Amino acid sequence: MSDQPSSFSAPRGTRDLLPPESWRWHRVFDVALNRVFGPAGYEPMDTPIFEHTEVFERGVGEATEVVSKQMYTFNDRGGRSLTLRPEATAGIVRAVLENRLDRGSLPVKLLCWGPMFRQERPQKGRYRQFTQIDIEAIGSEGPAIDAEIIELAARFLSEAGAECRLLLNSLGHLDGSCRLGYLKALVDYLRTHENELAPEDRSRIDDNPLRAFDSKEEPTIAVMKGAPAITDHLCNDCEQHFDEVRRLLDALDLEYTIDHTLVRGLDYYTRTAFEFVSDDVGAQASVLGGGRYDGLAESLGGGHLPGIGFALGVDRLLLASRTLSEWQPRHVGVFVVALGDRARSEALPIVTELRRAGVGADWDLMGRGMKGQMKSADRSGANWAVILGDDELDAGEVTLKDLATGEQQRIARGQLVIRVRAKES
RNA sequence: GCGGCCGUAGCUCAGCCAGGUUAGAGCACCCGGUUGUGGUCCGGGAUGUCGCCGGUUCAAAUCCGGUCGGUCGCCCCA
């Protein structure tokens, strides 16, 4: 636009949420809380939008892309380092520990939604401030909760009109022999093929070897086809856990694809990892991603407290949804059209009477003529127009017009609320 | 952090390559045709520092340079 100091635009990667799209956002939260996760025992909570920087450094992992390159970190006036949250789970687990929720009845099942912040180049389905719904079930190690949460995720996406495929993997135990043993085997494999790898993948062998699976470089992809799969290296406990998760998903008739290249980019993930992807979202196909994080509480300084959860990208969900992308509520049932000064002075009492009776009602506040008011009535989505002019005033009546059929009739003013309610129900 | 494409009315865009009256269209908006009737139709109207700065030229929306912004992709992730 302009670089004049007198005009402003929202910072890069942020945007204003305006009607009618804003209605769809609230609809997403309503479906999540009241239709899917609330009835399954998940309760709403919130954490601060910024945390002590250490929460993310220790929780998410200092070597991760998110923590090392993408955080909005600043010092407050007391010199403490604070960071706008780049993801929700670390803060939620911090809150669970701080408030001793883990001492109460387990598992703790929580739903949380709000803005996250990551400083990276915006593109379709990716913003610097973006909104996530986070679901967490904390306290249970067993595979049943994994299956429950994946089923809820799938059903929520379905309710929201997004067609997604489920990808599933197990990353093994962090401190168990399987994860470490596998990483060693993988690094050994990468070392023997080092000269065949793309240069940028070569440099990551030591600090983040799993990332090689996500590479889009042709030479690396060829090498990775022969790479050892983590699912072949799981210890007995992790293998049994994974088998049981799959058995439960099968019993629920949930379709999934085992993808041993599915590697979540945050350090805290262990065992079950999953992702729902859509083809309708652009290059950022991941609409919902999550997994188990059995070591997170300990890395934040707490005791052993296993958990599993996921983050859902609301921006991406709306891109992928075929039913919500056009959804719009119709709250206004009646539009009051007032003709002349006398009628105008009587219009607000009528509008108010309707509203107090629970009927959505609106009226003209711009001094438009009748034609303009009828147009507004049409645009408001109202089922009824109530027309009030000198004739009606003198008779103590109003004209009630059905905007769909065009039929209209005069009724006593005192009958208005009753008549409108009867026909609406 | 790197690359491709694009900046003209509220929105979507034409005009630019071959510089030359007053910069256009569709949609949307407002008013009127119907002094009391919307969604269709007809007529009229308002709205632009052609992103910004500089250069070339008698003359720049148009050519050149820079800059800012948007968008899509890479990396990474929701």
Image (cartoon, rainbow, N blue to C red):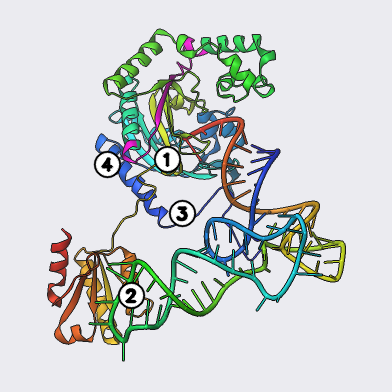
A143 and A373: which is toward the camera? A373
State if disc 1 and disc 4 touch (CB < 8 Å). no
Q: Considering only vertical position in the picture, is A352 above or below B62?
A: below
User: What SS does tag 1 mark?
Assistant: helix
Q: Which residue is mark 1?
A: A320
Residue type at mark 3 is Leu
Instruction: Give the label on residue A17, or none.
Output: 3
Please give the name of the residue rendered at 50% of the width and 42% of the height, measured from the top-left corner. Answer: A125
In percent of width and height, residue A222 lies at: 60, 16
Residue type at mark 4 is Arg
Residue A402 position by quadrant: bottom left
Tag 4 and tag 1 share a subunit: yes
Label 3 chain ID: A
Give the mark, 4 or 1, whose residue is nearer the N terminus. 4
In percent of width and height, residue A306 lies at: 39, 23
- Span colored in magenta: A158-180
Question: Which of the two discs, 1 and 3, sits closer to the camera?
Answer: 1
Question: Which of the two discs, 3 and 2, sits closer to the camera?
Answer: 2
User: What SS does tag 4 mark?
Assistant: helix
| Cα–Cα gap, marks 4 and 1 | 19 Å
User: What SS does tag 2 mark?
Assistant: helix
Label 4 chain ID: A
Q: Which residue is mark 4?
A: A35
Q: Which residue is mark 2?
A: A373
Tag 3 and tag 2 share a subunit: yes
Q: Considering only vertical position in the picture, is A335 above or below A188?
A: below
A218 and A45: which is toward the camera? A218
Residue B61 position by quadrant: bottom right
Give the mark, 3 or 4, whose residue is nearer the N terminus. 3
